Image (spheres, helix red, strand yellow):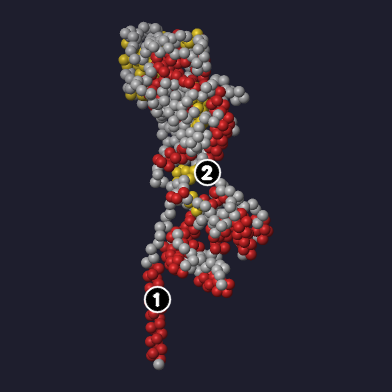
Amino acid sequence: MKHQALFGLVALLFAVAALRDGFEDWIDATELPPTLAETSVEIRDRNDELLRAYTVSGGIWRLAPVLTAVDDGYLDMLVRYEDKRFWQHGGVDPLAMLRATAQALWHRRAVSGGSTLTMQVARLIEDGSTGRWAGKLRQIRLALALERRLTKDQILSLYLTHAPYGGNLEGIRAATLAWFGKEPRRLTPAESALLVALPQSPEARRPDRHADRAKAARDRVLTRMADAGIIASDDALSAQHARIPDRLRAFPMRAAHLADRVRASAPERQRHATTIDARLQSALETLLADAARRSGPRISAALIAANHQTGEILASVGSPRYGTNGARQGFVDMTRAIRSPGSTLKPLIYGLAFDQGLVHPETLIHDGPVQFGRYAPRNFDGQFRGDIRVREALQLSLNIPVVRLTNELGPARVMTALSRAGAEARLPGGAPGLAIALGGVGVSLQDLVQLYATLAQGGAGQRLRSALNEPASRTERTISDVAAWQVGHILAGVAPPPGAPHGVLAYKTGTSYGHRDAWAIGYDGEHVVGVWMGRADGTPVPGAFGGDVAAPLLFQAFARLKPGFTPLPAPPPSTLITGAAGLPQPLQRFRPRSSGLAKAPNAPKLLFPPDGAILDSIGDTVTLKVQGGSAPYLVLANGRPIAKGQRRNEFEIPTPGAGYSTLVVVDGAGQSDRVTVRLD
């Protein structure tokens, strides 16, 4: 008998072990559904604030949570209410299941569930049923397998990703953004309790449709949490008086056009960090929307604000209202639309003319009737002002003087300078003509902001960028630092809009032919802002001038950007600051020298150094050799006179310093030649 009993015990132990091993094998063989669910692509600002998110397949809002960025009080409440032994069990809580079974037998209906959070995750990721025994058994098997292959934090993160919260909301972040307009970092007890209650019956308890049911479910959670000591009784009572949200909030959609471009540039990425400042972006979107609404139903507007010292774009508004198909055509990103720049290229042309030794800000230039072949430019008001200082010609945005300078420079040189500044200008067809000085070329708002950022940085600066981790890169040298300062100093003297401060911004306005585009672009010592207004379809806006509609927005944008204005830079040490009488004779009055395409037979030519030469900077002087022309010769380095009254064809000039320099020799008849060299 003893042997039989021992044999029976051994057999029982073997049977239990076999069952255990079979059970273990059954769990290990479980095929898990995918746990890496599709989550919304997110566009973030420079401070990691959400700018915009995109729905996943089926139009579902499902944002990936970060467990450490979810309110601890909510997590404590969730675990205590749904699965108080979550951190101890292996996927199934036998005590909870026994309790649920006993209550069901006693009351002849389901009173409480025995599902753990892990079992709920199993149901959510497999989208299975909860009621039938087969479904419940499958959840148990999946839960046990999940616990073996994932950590508790990973399982909790899956719940926070997939739990339903009504409508097309899945996951804790979608829920808090839609119901409370915020991320789940800090939640009140009332908010936490509602979020605990919603996934149990997300449609029947939707706050915007069934407020009474939602409140009752929330209050039950609060009562149980107070009884369990998770929150104080007074806090629970106070939370029961909190208002239930009555509507779904719209998800953030700031910098929407830029977000579309960023997403398209790297479609494989889930999170994109940008240089945008969400606070500033919101303020400027409101500013432009209000301005467009006041201007008429078909008016669109766009704006870019950037730090020209770093190249970071801080705000980008492509239209007053993104995505609308109405008269404003809000789906069109007007920061990238190719438009006529009007007079906004004039500062670049003057800067090139300063560098070429054609003029100085105090040089007299004639504003009178002129004709170049069949092209006869006119000023916007049809008036002529006779002899006028170059400074005033730019400040008044006169057309005739700048076309005369463009004729001397050659339109191709202006186009090359635009490219070197980082702007991609487009011609309507054929070779560039003199009309480019008045807007006869296509550019975008981003092109113009890039150009003015380059001017603000002394003629060579940072390329604009919107990706936070994108390496900084610089534009090519466009004009000298002296010429850039002279341009900025002139533009700072332009009269501001009524009520705006004077002398704080170097800015220029522009109006394209037929009043189709109104521009204002300006900078202080740190930031650059560009504003465009018009109609997206390119039809005229009668009576709209850049100075009237865009310039006030420019100054208002700076007011929202920061409390004051960063001072403009001081002049470079080599800047020639003098009145007209103190200028060298060839610079006192502008005289046409050459078309830039063909020189007069007796025009001077710089034989040495040749254009593009790399010279050794050892020593304090550089030797120049000039052929032709008539003495005396004037030499300018980067727009600054450094040698006057030279009567020999070979002479020495002071070294202009290391780096690239443009050397211009002007003879007694006002004819000139130039070379660009590099001193190492």
From the viewer's side, name the closer residue of 615 and 129: 129
From the viewer's side, name the closer residue of 85 and 568: 85
Find numbered disc 1 in the image and state the secondary structure of the residue it sits on: helix
Q: Using a 10 Å C-alpha cutoff, classify the residue at mark 2 as few (fewer than 14 neighbours), some (14 to 19) or many (20 or more).
A: some
Of marks 2 and 1, which one's residue comes earlier in the chain? 1
- Quadrant of the rendered image containing residue 25: bottom left
Q: Amino acid at mark 1?
A: Leu
Q: Quadrant of the C terminus?
A: top left
Q: Which mark is residue 19?
A: 1
Q: Quadrant of the N terminus?
A: bottom left
Q: Which mark is residue 252?
A: 2
Name the side, left or right, on which 188 lies relative to 446: right
Give me the residue at 43% from left, 42% from top: 263
Give me the residue at 38% from left, 90% from top: 3
Residue 422 visible in the displayed image: yes
Give me the residue at 52% from left, 52% from top: 167
Query: Eyeballing the image, is 133 above or below 519?
Result: below
> What is the distance, in whole Å, between disc 2 and disc 1 at their CAs?
55 Å
Give me the residue at 47% from left, 32% from top: 334
